[in-house]
Amino acid sequence: MKNMILLSLFFTVFSANAYFYSGNDLREPMRQYLKAEANDKDTDYLKAFEYAGYAIGVYDSTAPFLCTPSKVNRNQILAMIAKYLNSNPEDWHLPARTLIQSSLFESFPCPSEDKN
């Protein structure tokens, strides 16, 4: 729990108030990624790659703070992020980075160090 609080403070302190990309901005690229995964012929692959690149970039920068199982692959990570985004439409106005990090911390929490 202590590490989670410190980590939250870290991201809060070093986060700018302005952001480039919101959850609303990520919705269409995510939708195109899901279409690509379903082999839909009408997929906009540029948008699909936009989602994948952005989401994996946030994952890569957050990975040192996660406890990701060794056998988890890129597609699983992208699917978990998409599931989180689709389940939390009330948060789409937030920075996309924040939403992705929230999904990752929810999916790959580290064991608590508290022994209480």
Image: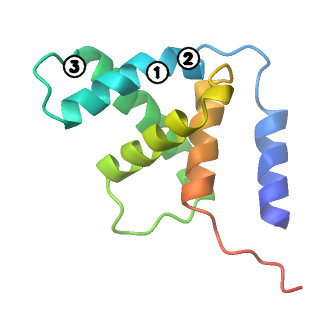
Element on which disc 3 rests = helix
Report the label total.
3
Work out how far the residue at label 3 is from the one at label 1, CA to CA, in angstroms: 14 Å
Is 93 rendered above or below residue 85?
above
Of residues 10 and 75, which is closer to you in this image? 75
Disc 3 marks which amino acid? Tyr
Q: Residue at x 83, y 79 (%)?
A: 114
What is the number of the mark on residue 73?
A: none
Q: Nearer the viewer, mark 3 or mark 1?
A: 1
Disc 2 marks which amino acid? Asn
Q: Residue at x 40, y 17 (%)?
A: 28
Mark 3, other Cα within 10 Å: few <14 / some 14–19 / many ≥20: some
Work out how far the residue at label 1 is from the one at label 2, CA to CA, in angstroms: 5 Å
In this figure, which residue is indicated by the disc labeled 3?
45
Check contact, mark 1 vs mark 2: CB within 8 A: yes
Is 11 rendered above or below residue 106?
above
Mark 2, other Cα within 10 Å: few <14 / some 14–19 / many ≥20: some
In this figure, which residue is indicated by the disc labeled 2?
24
Element on which disc 1 rests = helix
Q: Earlier in the sequence, mark 3 or mark 2?
A: 2
The picture quadrant where one finds residue 54 is top left
Residue 78: x and y in percent read 38, 42
Element on which disc 2 rests = helix
Asked whether, in this view, residue 12 is left or right of residue 33, the answer is right
Q: Earlier in the sequence, mark 3 or mark 1?
A: 1
Asked whether, in this view, residue 63 is left or right of residue 56, the answer is right
Residue 57: x and y in percent read 46, 35
